Structures are given as C-alpha cells and as structure tokens.
Image (spheres, helix red, strand yellow):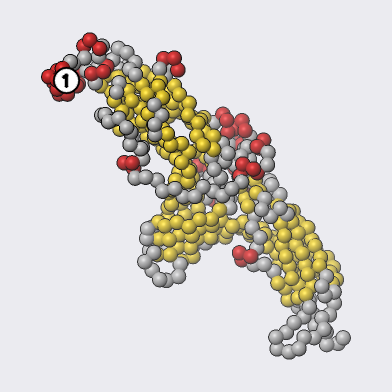
Amino acid sequence: MSNAKLGRLNAQILIDDGFRIHYGPTDTVSGRIVLSYKPHSSLLKSNAPTADLFGPISIQGILRSKVRVKVRRGDSHRLPTDHSKILFEYVFDVFVGSFKATVGEDFSYPFAINLPQDLKDIYDPANGGYAELMSSGDSRDQLLPLTFSMHFVDHPDVVSVGVLHQIGAQVTMPGIDIKTDIPSGDDRPPIRLELPRPPRALVERNKTTFIQNARVQNEYLLPEEERPQGFKQKAKAVFTSSHFPEFVVDVQCTYQQYIHPGQQLTFEVVLRRNDRKSTAEVFPDATLEGFQCDLRAYTIVDVSNRLIGSPQCIDTRTVQILAGHSRLSKQLNKESDYSIAIMTDPVMQNVSSFAHQKVSRQYLLRIAMQLKLAKESVKVRKECPVILLPPPEDSGSDEALAGPSQSYIRPPPDDEYLPAYGEAGSSTFLSAG
C-alpha cells in the first residue's frame, strides 16, 4: 500500500455531566477527549487507501475564559464593534506518549482540571464572606465573572454580552503531518460556573436594618374633646395646622443582606416612637396599607476602548416582583409591639452577584411601603443592596435552581411605583436616605 495516505484525527471534548453547575474554583471539571481516526479523503482526486497511524502524540486541554461584548449603534447599519476580552487561557497536559490507530478506531483520554486556585481565597467565607463581590476597586480584575449572557439596549447602543468558560484541546504528533479536526471558538463545550455554595449560617446571620423617620401633624393627634368641631373650626384648622401636636416615628425594616434562589425573604417592619421629636401624647392608630419589594439587577459593561460613546453600557431592570401587597390593611398596635412580618414569594434563579472590571452584575431590593398614621398616609421607599448567592451547601440537589431565570418585568413609572390606594387622604413622601 505504497500509495496509502494518512487520514484525519477528529477530537471530541466531552465534559462529565455537561449541564451541571460548577460551584467555584475548587469544584473540579472532569471529562474526556475522544480521538477518532478518520479515513483519508480528497476533493481533487479519488480517495487513496488510509494508512495506519503510529507515532508520539501530545494531547492537551485548554481552559479558557472570555468576556464577549458586541455593541451596535441602534441607528447604524454597520456591523457591531467587538469589545471582547480573553481573561486567561490555561493549557494542561492530558496525555503524552505513543499512539497507534487504524481507521475507525476511537480512543478516550480522561482529564480533570480546576479553575485558577488564586481565586479561592476571594470567595472563602472565612475571609469575610462575599464582600469582594461589592468591590469597586482594581481588585475586581481578580474576580472571575460567572457564566451568563444577555442582550440589552442602552440607547443608542444595542449590547450583547456574555461570559464564556470553555474547555478546548490541541493535538500534535511531532514529526508527523497529520490533519486534525478540533472544536474551536464557540464550539468548545462550556462550563457553567457559579459562586461556591455558602454555609447556611452565613446567609441566615447576615441581616441588616434601615431606619427612616415618618412625621405627621394633624388634628387627630389631639385628644378627641379638643379636636375642631363644625365647619368653621375645621376650616380654620387647615390654616393653623402647625399648632397641632406632632408625631414622629422611626420606621425600621429588617431584611436579609444575602439572598439565594428558592428563599422566601422575610421583612420585619417595626414602628418606634421618636420621643425626642414627638409632641403628641399618644401613639396614634397605625396601619400598614401596602408593601412592595422588587429585585433589581444592574449590569455594567466596560467599552472604554471605543472612540465614540460612553465608556460604559448599563442595563437596569426588575428581574422579579417579590412582594406586591397593595391592600394589606394590617394594624400595628401595642399588642403586636407595633411590628409586622412580611414574607415574599421564593427568589427565582438568576446569575449570582459578581464584580469584574469588564462586566459586573449587582442586585438591590427596591422596597416601598405605605403607612397610615393618624389617618394620614405616609410613603417610605428604600433601595437596599443585596448579594445574590447560590443555594446554601445543605440545600441538597440543584432542584432549587430548576427552571429559567425570571423574564424581564417592566417596572411602572416612578410615580406609579406604589399602587393607588382606595382611601383618599393627605400623603407625605419620604425619600430613601
């Protein structure tokens, strides 16, 4: 068979449990590279017999991470500009030795690899939990972004961004001119990278409270026998309301700072009289009329290397309405210690919080509530940064992660954020501090 020709080596890269989520850099990625020796073929002349293949071979895996960013001007017909960045490429040996194959034979070479170990300490709860995920300094370049992709509009830009972690391969046979077919680019199998699963104790103990003052001043803070009676007295009271007693209350709201998919968040709303600022003698009737909580996501993409336009593209969206109670009418009184607990729907699956100079994903809770104090409505709003994590270590299987991420829900305009309430009345707006 003097006219025999060498065939081709076809490589397949198979990751064990390819759809499994890998939690952090210590969660080993294992799989195998399958080599198949294919017959010689030619488009220009009749196919010659395929010779057996024998010789030294080097099979290497390539662990590769990339942030893919493409931006197109909405009013432009030009191709999108590419602002992608390769974070790293790490080459590791899978097999080095002799290789012998005849046409049609398959060979499997297992591998196991971890993501860069210098990331481990950043995510280690023993080193302060996940505080680095809220970082805004240069240290963010050490934080490996998590697997995700999205498209959004930041007028006039249309942005496509994705974080890809992939396993590639390269096969060489020194001294032998052998053609190879190896997956490249987006054909390389992806790794679904998430943060390490936190201890449950870390999630449960990280609660925080915000406090805002609410103030009312009207006739209903007077003893009943001293309140204006009749049309004339009530009309006069409108212009002398500053003489009425004043009631100031500290509105306290406690919430979880670390949240995770499957978790039902609990908010505790507590009213405490501010004795220093209050002149009213009694604690008036208090009602929680409405409570709403939205989970908001902020995605920031760095495009600072472009010549025209902002150096950043930013997307802000509501990813889930966790609670939307517009007709609560819950009394807060002495028997309940002027407090009430509100539980939300379970948090749905979204990519966890991460921070990197090229792309970052952060979350906050947008909380809005309406109280009625002494028949006067008071609105309270607050935006509270939170860290979204995977389910805790003892959550069992990935059942809490099942299902797609919550689709985009367009938030109402700011002045319609709280629903209209049935009973008309004066209203005081308290902005978040």
Above or below, 102 against 329 in this view is below
Residue appearing at x 43%, y 61% in the figure: 158
Residue appearing at x 46%, y 36% in the figure: 323
Residue 368 spot, x, y in % from top left: 39, 35
Residue 294 spot, x, y in % from top left: 44, 40
Above or below, 412 against 420 in this view is below
Secondary structure of the residue carrying numbered label 1: helix
Residue appearing at x 86%, y 87% in the figure: 2
Residue 302 visible at all: no
The residue under label 1 is 234
Horizontal arrangement in the rendering, residue 334 relative to residue 358 (left or right): left
Identity, as a three-letter code, of the amino acid under mark 1: Lys
Q: Quadrant of residue 125?
A: top right
Horizontal arrangement in the rendering, residue 95 relative to residue 412 (left or right): right
Which image quadrant: the C terminus? Answer: top left
Horizontal arrangement in the rendering, residue 10 relative to residue 196 (left or right): right
Residue appearing at x 41%, y 24% in the figure: 330
Above or below, 219 against 359 in this view is above
